[in-house]
Structures are given as C-alpha cells and as structure tokens.
Image (spheres, helix red, strand yellow):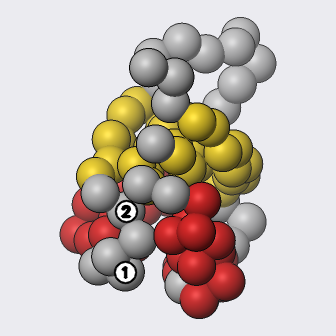
Amino acid sequence: MIIYNVTINIEDDAHDAWLSWMKETHIPDVMSTGMFLDFNFSKLLSRQDDETGETYVIQYLCESMEKYDKYQSQFAPSLQADTQKMFAGKFVAFRTLMEKVD
C-alpha cells in the first residue's frame, strides 16, 4: 500500500475558506480520479513556538506505484494549479510518499 502524504500550512486569514474548499471540492476531486482507495484528513495539534497558521495532513491511500504515477502525470498538475489559483501565497505544502509496512 502506497501512502501519498500532503502536509499543508495555511495562513489564518485564508483558513476557513481553504478548509471548506478542501472538504467540499479539492479532496472529492482527488478521490474522483479513481487512483486512491481512501484518505485521512487530519489537523496537526503540535506546533513550534514561532509557527503561524494551521497545519493539516492529507494521506491518500493508493494500491500501487503505477496508480500513483498515473495520478502524478495525469491529474496532479491541474489539481495543484487549482490550489495555487485559489490560495496563492497563503499556504506552504510539502509532499512525501510512503509505503505501508505490515
């Protein structure tokens, strides 16, 4: 099982609009690609003293590297562009790829 992990810190002044957009639009759009089996959407509770904004983690579960690669080549560019268009300059995101260990 492959886990595509997206960690996002969103500025306070964009937080509410971003959170609604993630729940109502972006995550459903990612899931509608058919490349992922499920997802987890979590808010980070721990923070650094100098950290601002709120940090969230979305973990998308994928059955194979082939499907992940297809997502990255066929779907990710436009979905990430949508995020930039909506919230440019208001967030920082980093992505990691993990493999579930049984």
Residue designated by label 1: 33
Q: Count the numbered circles shown.
A: 2
Instruction: Give the quadrant of residue 52.
Output: top right
Q: Nearer the viewer, residue 41 or 64?
A: 64
Instruction: Pinpoint residue 6: horizontal percent, then vertical percent.
Output: 58, 48
Q: Please say whether residue 52 is visible from this viewpoint.
A: yes
Label 2 is placed on what type of residue?
Phe
Q: Is residue 19 above or below residue 12?
A: below
**What residue sits right under mark 2 in the picture?**
36
Q: Note whether 1 is above or below 20 in the view shown.
A: above
Q: In percent of the image, x 43 and y 55: which residue is there? A: 62
Taking 91 as reference, is 13 left or right?
Answer: left
The answer to whether mark 2 and mark 1 are in CB contact below 8 A is: yes
Label 1 neighbour load within 10 Å: few <14, some 14-19, many 20+: few
Q: Look at 32% across and 76% down and name the residue there.
A: 34
Q: Amino acid at mark 1?
A: Thr
Mark 1 residue element:
loop
